[in-house]
Image (spheres, rainbow, N blue to C red):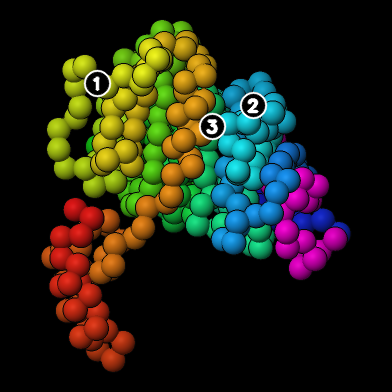
Amino acid sequence: MPYLSLILTFSSFGCASVDILQNTTPIEITQSWSQMPSGWVYPISISVPEVTPPQEGFPVCILLHGNGSSGPPMVSQFRSILPNHALVAPSGYANSWNICAESSDAPDWEMIRQLVDRLGSFSNVDADRIQMLGVSNGAALVNTVFALQPPVSIEAYVAVVSHLNESQYHENSFHQPDSETDPGQPWCGYSKPVVPAMSRRYLSMSNVNDGTIPYEGGISPVGVTFLSATDAIYKVAQSQGFKGEALSGPQPQVPGEPIWEYVYLEGQVTHLRGLAQHGMSPGHEAYAGEFLSRPPITACDGDKDGNGEVGFQDLTLILSSWGPDIGFDELLQVLGNWGACL
């Protein structure tokens, strides 16, 4: 059934008076859909470091729980892992996130879009460093949001123990739900082909001994068919401009941990193959903390079409748009940065 409405509301304090993100900041995102036609407000847990924010503001990590859990335990787990981040952890309807056949049919990806827009308005938040980390069912939502068009302003994604499934990637393309998910429809309703935005950082963690999400791909106990973890990360790397062959064979090991790295694009896109079953080891947690503490990717000067490289497409775009607003300065920028970010 189609969603009935999507409404973003704020508390009676008023939007203008709440310009600093705090632990007690009221953020209310209300959505209405077939299960909750009168509307439902997402509970949101917030934890902001008790220090003076950097000049540019705190980086923010949106934390997405696994099926059956909620936001507060995610804040408790990651407060020490991301000590310099503001943490924002919503709870999904029926303690789940809507991917295909979960208890919730809510348009959770639209909630994320609204939440990101709201977070970017706070004066102590770095709007260029809004990130996402999800575990299991939450990681599946991370993968949905990663490919959304129009894109969401999130610069880094971490998917823990849930890599791409065949609804999200099939027929040689990423897909997003057109309007709703439906397990009775082909690909569960993920019918709209999309191209993920460039200059995104992405980390996946999957374990070869995971009894819930099959590392080598196939049908899982939750009824969803997955790509293999190594094929999934290759598709993500290709979406970010990687041109080579998929990594195979032995890969570097994280010191002191049974974790192996598959590194693409100098670490912009990375996969960790581990042995932590359907969870994270201390090594996984430390790696996630380090990954999310890296600076965001700087866009290429002269990259007019936003594909992460400066080349013939940008030159063609300049020449085809030549006029009062596009001229020699833009042309020189493209020519001066030719080959950048390739």
Which residue is label 1 attached to?
A: 251
How far, Cα to Cα, is label 3 from label 1?
25 Å
Q: Residue furthest bottom?
A: 324
Disc on res. 134: 3
Give the overall secondary structure of the magenta segment.
loop
Q: x and y percent of residue 48 in the render?
A: 70, 45
Q: Amino acid at mark 1?
A: Gln
How far, Cα to Cα, is label 3 from label 2?
12 Å
Residue at point 75%, 50% (across, down): 22
Q: Amino acid at mark 3?
A: Gly
Q: x and y percent of residue 265 in the render?
A: 26, 41
Which element type, helix, strand or loop, lies under badge 2? Answer: helix
Disc on res. 98: none
| Any part of residue 324 in sight | yes
Q: x and y percent of residue 116 in the render?
A: 58, 52
280 vs 321: above or below = above
Residue at point 17%, 72% (across, down): 336
Which element type, helix, strand or loop, lies under badge 1? Answer: loop
Q: Earlier in the sequence, mark 3 or mark 1?
A: 3
Label 1 environment density (alpha carbons within 10 Å; few <14, some 14–19, many ≥20)? some
89 vs 280: above or below = below
Which residue is label 2 attached to?
A: 77
Q: Earlier in the sequence, mark 3 or mark 2?
A: 2
Asked if residue 38 lies in the magenta stretch, the reply is no
Bounds of the magenta segment: 13-35
Q: x and y percent of residue 192 in the render?
A: 38, 45
